[in-house]
Image (cartoon, grey):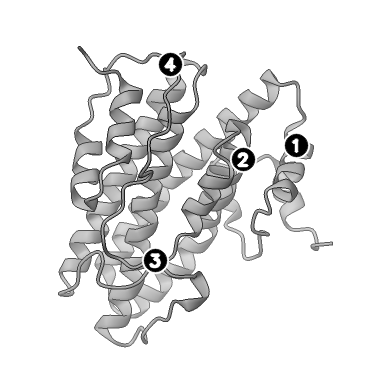
Amino acid sequence: MNIGLREAALAILLEQDADTKAARTLALPADLPVDTALRLDEPPGIPGRPARPVLVAHTALTRPSMRTPQGRAALIHSLAHIELNAIDLAIDILWRFPDMPASFYTDWLQVAKEEAYHFTLLRDHLRSFGFDYGSFDAHNALWDMAERTKGDLLARIALVPRTLEARGLDASPAVKAKLVGAGDLAAGAILDIILRDEIGHVSLGNRWYRYVCEQRDLDPIATYAGLVAAYDAPRLRAPFNLEARKAAGFSEEELTALQLPTP
């Protein structure tokens, strides 16, 4: 029996080995049939995770000095961990939520493939330092939000691509400056690729968020504020990469609201 795109995505999400997960994502054919109405039961073990890195609280993470190869490797490792989580997030939205247009699923497949490419770039660069993915501890904050929003597609799109991934757009210039300032020009070039692609990912989040709001007859801005409060999403703090956010499709009203004092 031929397997469809959404079933294939779920199988990849369960994969525990990070390298294999990235390779399987990159190899997943884009022309697999999409059964948009299919409802899949959630199996145990989502997402599949390697034995390492050890996942700890965000506050428990420590980073060596950026003046040392180990410190730069630790930062590269944290970025690789974000990208592996981003594969899981894109794959999860693809299989979990039925009844969307077929283009919704192929859009998120493309996102997953680009996240897998980012992971391989960072993993290979990490190996050039004599480290590997799993050499340092990591945190689970990104997937925590996926767990909280798994019952509502609107909340997932609002609070993962439009919030957590958009924070990545804001953080990118400072992270790049740290690595380039420490002499790691190769990492800076990788971050340029990631920023370019992540603008596209956040743009998709904006487009599909507005689509679902329209389907439910909801005001996008008021609804977003309600979702942030309901799901205890992290508060956004300056500095903001306004140019990247504008390129990703945030409205002028949204960009202005970002810069207002927090009540």
Amino acid identity at mark 2: Ala
Query: Circle 1 is placed at which residue position?
Result: 223
Lateral position of residue 227 relative to residue 167, left or right? right
**Comes first in the chain, label 2 or label 3:** 3
- Dots 2, 1 in contact, CB < 8 A: yes
Q: Element at badge 3?
A: loop
The residue that appears at 35% across and 31% down in the rendered structure is 109
Amino acid identity at mark 1: Thr
Q: Is residue 80 above or below residue 256?
A: below
- Dots 4, 3 in contact, CB < 8 A: no
Query: Circle 4 is placed at which residue position?
Result: 38
Query: Circle 2 is placed at which residue position?
Result: 158
The residue that appears at 71% across and 41% down in the rendered structure is 224
Q: Element at badge 2?
A: helix
**Comes first in the chain, label 1 or label 3:** 3
Query: Circle 3 is placed at which residue position?
Result: 55
Q: Give me the C-alpha separation between circle 1 and circle 3.
A: 32 Å
Lateral position of residue 161 relative to residue 82, left or right? right
Amino acid identity at mark 3: Leu
Lateral position of residue 30 relative to residue 231, left or right? left
The image shows residue 68 at horizontal and vertical percentages of 28, 87
The image shows residue 227 at horizontal and vertical percentages of 71, 43
Amino acid identity at mark 4: Leu
Task: Categorize mark 4 by other alpha carbons within 10 Å: few (<14), some (14-19), many (20+).
Answer: some
Q: Give me the C-alpha separation between circle 2 and circle 4.
A: 23 Å
The quadrant holding residue 186 is bottom left
- Dots 4, 1 in contact, CB < 8 A: no
Q: Which part of the image, by quadrant, shows the N terminus?
A: top left
The image shows residue 249 at horizontal and vertical percentages of 59, 38
Q: Give me the C-alpha separation between circle 4 and circle 3.
A: 33 Å
The quadrant holding residue 132 is bottom left
